[in-house]
Amino acid sequence: MKRQVPFTLRFDQDLYDRVKTTSRRQGRSITAFVQEAVARRLEEEEAAVLFKAFTLVGEDSDEASVEFASDAQREVALKGE
């Protein structure tokens, strides 16, 4: 198991109550609920960054050419024949 680092979070009362109610309903600790929520949000953010990067590549058709990759894949695939 990865080492966990304890730290304090501050929620307004309404948010805390919602987290507490939801985590209890799911039979989980507040810590597990918050860890999952933060991990999911980080994954969404990382996916958005990658999407933006790939979108930028596609904006310039000269730079978006993937022929070199196709040629490289073809070379590797045919190398064993």
Image (cartoon, rainbow, N blue to C red):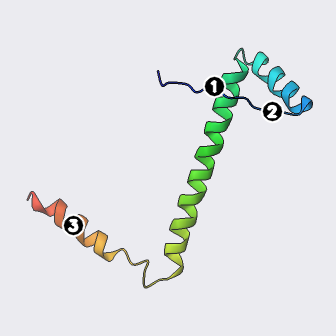
Give the number of the disc on residue 10: 2
Left or right of residue 69, residue 79 in this image: left
- Residue labelled with disc 3: 74
Left or right of residue 13, residue 57 in this image: left
User: Residue sitting at 56 percent across and 61 percent down?
Assistant: 51
Residue 7 spot, x, y in % from top left = 67, 28
Task: Estimate the spatial distance between the alpha carbons at disc 1 and disc 2, rounded to whole Å.
Answer: 13 Å
User: Residue sitting at 49 percent across and 74 percent down?
Assistant: 57
Left or right of residue 31, residue 21 in this image: right
Image position of 77 with respect to 10: above or below: below
Specify few, some or many for label 1: CA neighbours under 10 Å numbering under 14, 14-19, or 20 or more.
few
Residue 61 spot, x, y in % from top left = 47, 83
- Residue labelled with disc 1: 6
Quarter of the image for residue 20 reads top right
Q: Which mark is in front, 3 or 2? A: 2
Residue 19 spot, x, y in % from top left = 80, 27
Residue type at mark 2 is: Arg
Residue type at mark 1 is: Pro
Q: Which of 66 and 52 is in front in this view?
A: 52
